[in-house]
Amino acid sequence: MPDLHGWISQQIDGMEALARAGKRGWWEPWVLRRCEADRRILARHTLDPDVHYEPACKGCGTYGDMELPETDNLNECPELLDLAYAHGLTPEILASLDCPEPPPAPPRPEPTAVNLSAYMRLWTAQPTSSVPPALRGPNWKARP
């Protein structure tokens, strides 16, 4: 079974096919425009490719300083649910739909080797006798 996004896409395709195959009437242009409008809503409310730990809705946006997804699960997107109910979604159909899979995380870069000797030189004590007099404080004691 498809997820909510896929189910709505199937319903729109079916409605458009009926409109194109049926008798021509005043309603036909309206149905075709409605199909196009529904597809535009679907195009905005898709899986967020930047969220890899849950199937978040990109169209619902984010909130807070950490930019967490407003809708964690695409099947719970309020815009898609309203659209689906207009196409005949029932609680039974909704319960039977698959949960969308979050997009795969990008591969992590391989760790690079660290030159420890360079870090050790930074932390090794330098002789204080090389400090110029202008930088020495009032209680300076030179060490050999």
Image: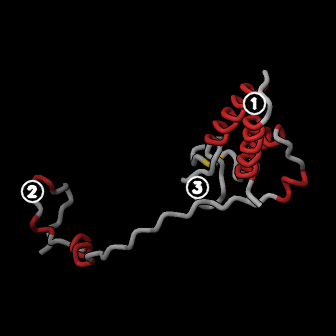
Query: In front: 129, or 126?
Result: 126
Marks 1 and 2, how far apart in space? 87 Å
Q: Secondary structure at mark 1?
A: helix
Disc number placed over residue 31 in the picture, else none: 1
Circle 1 crowding by C-alpha within 10 Å: few under 14, some 14–19, many from 20: some
User: Closer to us: mark 3 or mark 1?
Assistant: 1
Residue 79, quarter of picture: top right
Figure quadrant of the C terminus:
bottom left
Figure quadrant of the N terminus:
bottom right
Q: Is residue 55 left or right of residue 98?
A: left
Can you identify the residue that label 2 sits on? 133
Asked whether the residues under the numbered discs 3 and 1 touch, taking CB atoms below 8 Å apart as contact, a structural biologist would say no
Which residue lies at the image location 70% right of the left edge and 35% below the top edge? 35
Circle 2 crowding by C-alpha within 10 Å: few under 14, some 14–19, many from 20: few
Can you identify the residue that label 3 sits on? 51
Residue type indicated by callout 1: Val
